[in-house]
Image: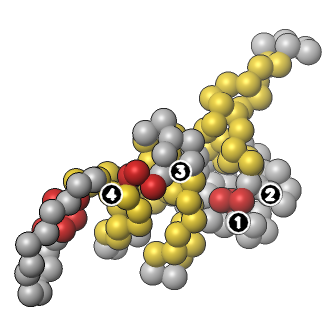
């Protein structure tokens, strides 16, 4: 596994998502109120791109006819068949014990750290003015 810079934090405002490809893998990056999460962009049911799905909440009920929407903005719905996945964990709400969308570790790294890296190359004077979203694949 290696770390890959996929976007500047400023390019993914809260509530947004972005599709990226890392080492040939399509990965959906989500910003939930300043926290970043990454899921493989493939529904385990029949392969639809999760990044294209509707972001919604979890419908719960405390009795017949008394429904409410919990966790708004934290559930992604497959655009083909409506399977729902927790953006934070990849857990399926269709069959939570067996099905999940693969999740990738995400961190926000200061630009100075990303530039520093473990690289060996000619060096130039560089200034970094923002943080970046980094996905570990």
The quadrant in which residue 115 appears is bottom left
- Residue in the image at 52% along x and 57% along y: 29
The percent coordinates of residue 79 (x first, y second) are 80, 57
The answer to whether mark 2 and mark 3 are in CB contact below 8 A is no
Q: Tell me the element at label 4.
A: strand
Ranked by sequence position, the earlier of labels 4 and 2 is: 2
Q: CA distance from mark 3 to mark 4?
A: 13 Å
Say whether residue 123 is left or right of residue 36. left
Ranked by sequence position, the earlier of labels 2 and 1 is: 1
Read off the residue under disc 4.
132
Q: CA distance from mark 4 to mark 2?
A: 29 Å
The answer to whether mark 2 and mark 1 are in CB contact below 8 A is yes
| Foreground residue among 111 and 48 | 111
Ranked by sequence position, the earlier of labels 3 and 4 is: 3
Ranked by sequence position, the earlier of labels 3 and 1 is: 3
Q: Tell me the element at label 3.
A: strand
Q: CA distance from mark 2 to mark 3?
A: 16 Å
Categorize mark 4 by other alpha carbons within 10 Å: few (<14), some (14-19), many (20+): many
- Residue in the image at 14% along x and 80% along y: 119
> Which mark is nearer the camera, 3 or 4?
4
The quadrant in which residue 100 appears is bottom right
Q: Tell me the element at label 2.
A: loop
| Foreground residue among 23 and 95 | 23
Read off the residue under disc 2.
79
Categorize mark 2 by other alpha carbons within 10 Å: few (<14), some (14-19), many (20+): some
> Which of the numbered marks, if any, corresponds to residue 49?
1
The percent coordinates of residue 118 (x first, y second) are 13, 75
């Amino acid at each position: 596994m290696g770390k890959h810079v996929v976007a500047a934090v400023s390019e993914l405002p809260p509530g947004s998502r972005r599709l990226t490809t890392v080492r040939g893998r399509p990965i959906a990056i989500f910003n939930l109120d300043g926290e970043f999460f990454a899921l493989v962009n493939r529904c385990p049911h029949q392969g639809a791109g999760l990044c294209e799905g509707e972001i919604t909440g979890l419908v719960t009920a405390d009795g017949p006819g008394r429904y409410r929407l919990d966790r708004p903005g934290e559930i992604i719905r497959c655009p083909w068949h409506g399977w729902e996945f927790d953006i934070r964990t990849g857990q399926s709400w269709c069959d939570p014990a067996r099905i999940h969308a693969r999740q990738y570790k995400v961190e926000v790294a200061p630009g100075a750290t990303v530039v520093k890296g473990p690289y060996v190359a000619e060096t130039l004077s560089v200034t970094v003015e923002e943080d970046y979203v980094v996905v570990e694949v």
